[in-house]
Image (tube, rainbow, N blue to C red):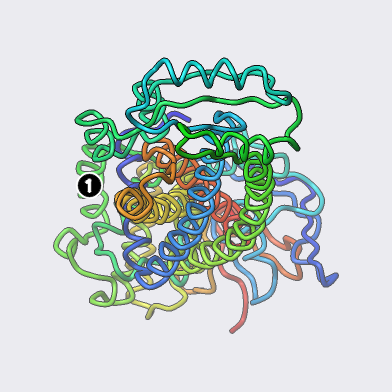
Amino acid sequence: MAMSLNSVWYITKETGRNLVYNTWMTLASVSTVAISMFVLSFFLVLTVNMNHLTTVLQNQVEMRVFINTNVPRSKEMALLNEADKWPGVRKIQFFTKQQAAESLKREFPDQRDLLTLIAKSNPLFDGFNVYTKNPAEIPALAVRFQHQKVVHNVVYEGQVVRRLSRLSIIMKWVGWVVELLLGLATLFIIINTIRLAVFARRREVAVMKLVGATDWFIRWPFILEGLVLGLVGAGIADVVVAQGYHWLVAAAAGALPFWPMAPYSQVMGKTVDFTLGGGLLVGGLASMVALRRFLRV
Amino acid sequence: MIRLENVSKRYGNGHYGVIDVNLEIHRGEFLFLVGPSGAGKSSLIRMLYREEVPTAGEIFLDEFRLSQLRRNQVSRLRRQLGVVFQDVKLLTNRTVFQNVAFAMEVVGAKSHEIQKRVPQVLDLVGLSRKRNNFPHQLSGGEQQRVGIARALVNNPVYVIADEPTGNLDPDTAFEIIKLLNEINRRGATIIMATHARDIVNQMHKRVVAVENGRIVRDEARGAYGYES
């Protein structure tokens, strides 16, 4: 639609006027959008993290055997060759503590403290990645490794991975259902806000129709109002989530240093996409519904 | 030219507002639409600016066929028209200047055009000095002048007035009519529904009388012609 600069300015002005005129409804709408988008982000942060955790764990092998420090490489190799012949062992790989540090860097990109610590003096262990022929043999095999003198400890987490990925699917669905309900509530509040704006401007609208303003010229300020409400609400939620997740990552690095938090950039990228998209969607939809129902142009 | 062909308007309750009306109005005419209350004057007027659509027949206004207009064409029709009401319909939170400028803003006029055109129209209706007043600071006659200025500001071909002097005392009403007459002399076509018999009788313009939804009289230099 071709529109003069003057019209664009007029429409912007009217939108601003609507928003300021209905201060309380504007605030109510923005806060409901913000709350709704915050809850959406909450579920997003949760699912992104669970997905991250699942992938990290899946990338880990079925069983990991760590060797005591100060064990000479020859003894490590002897155990490697011996264990390779044990029944139940399908494959066994040696890794050095330098390699362990590298993979740690990949899994915890946001934990600078941890990474600098590793860079200074590597506290990690050499070890083996062990793959079994049958997962049921893992516990017995773990015990057998544990009995070796040079072995520091053994970890295996096959079950956890399976449970986690099931849980993250459930979380996703719970998230969508909660979000749908909140989205509906938000929709109705914005519809009502725009209805009030239309009502407050019914005389202007009548005059506009009379002198031949186009339907879209009359509609734009109200549509824009809905979009602005959605966008501002989403923006507020994003700021809160950005601060909150930043804090959470820092806190986790202190309290649970080996918990693999999803990287900040990945979480915020998803959050911003979904909240801004959701805000615009709910705002635009509300405008459309409100105009269809309350603005007979 | 405006042409009504066998126009009828039947309302939802079965009542007829207008029955089988034929009428031609040429450019440059000044036409009074007279008749008792409820005769169908307002129905006719409202169909001219397409606030209502005939249930039968057709209205032609220059290149427009009013019953065929799609919604997005109505705005194009209305830009050819200036509509004036008994209750003026001014925006109370805007000044005289802003009320008139509003009509230009919303049809996408450029700012410098507005700044040039609005003072001209305010000058024509004699309200240059009150351009910064708000409607509640004006007399009834002055308010109606603002209404006329707003109707004129986009240079309409046709000015349609529905009882514009209905709320005014006779002297003020006469001032308004003189203003409309001046606008007519400058080229606009005026169609005015009215009860003001003295004015109609004095002006010697075309008079179309409506009764019970039908045209009962159409005189080139007519008089009001009703008792009361």
Residue at point 20% right, 44% down? B115
Depth order, front residue of A247/B124:
A247
> Position of A38 compared to A51: left or right?
left
Determine crowd level at label 1: few under 14, some 14-19, many 20+ residues with C-alpha closer than 10 A.
some
Q: Note whether A274 is above or below A104 in the view shown.
A: below
Q: Which residue lies most toward the bottom here?
A: B228
Depth order, front residue of B43/A71:
A71
> Position of A257 compared to A295: left or right?
left
Residue type, numbered disc 1: Gln
Badge 1 element: helix
Depth order, front residue of A257/A68:
A68
Residue at point 20% right, 41% down? B116
Q: Is the N terminus of chain B in the top left, top right, bottom left or bottom right quadrant?
A: top right
Asked if residue A109 can be seen in this view, the reply is: yes
Residue at point 78% right, 66% down? B11
**Residue that carries the numbered disc 1 in the rendered image:** B120
Residue at point 47% right, 75% down? B166
Q: Position of residue B219 (x, y in %)?
A: 62, 56
Q: Which residue lies most toward the right here?
A: B14
Q: Note whether A92 is above or below A139 in the view shown.
A: above
Q: Is the C terminus of chain B in the top left, top right, bottom left or bottom right quadrant?
A: bottom right
Q: Note whether A88 is above or below B38 in the view shown.
A: above
> Position of B52 compared to A219: left or right?
right
Question: Which picture quadrant has residue B131?
Answer: bottom left
Depth order, front residue of A248/A244:
A248
Chain for mark 1? B
Q: Position of residue A253 (x, y in %)?
A: 32, 48
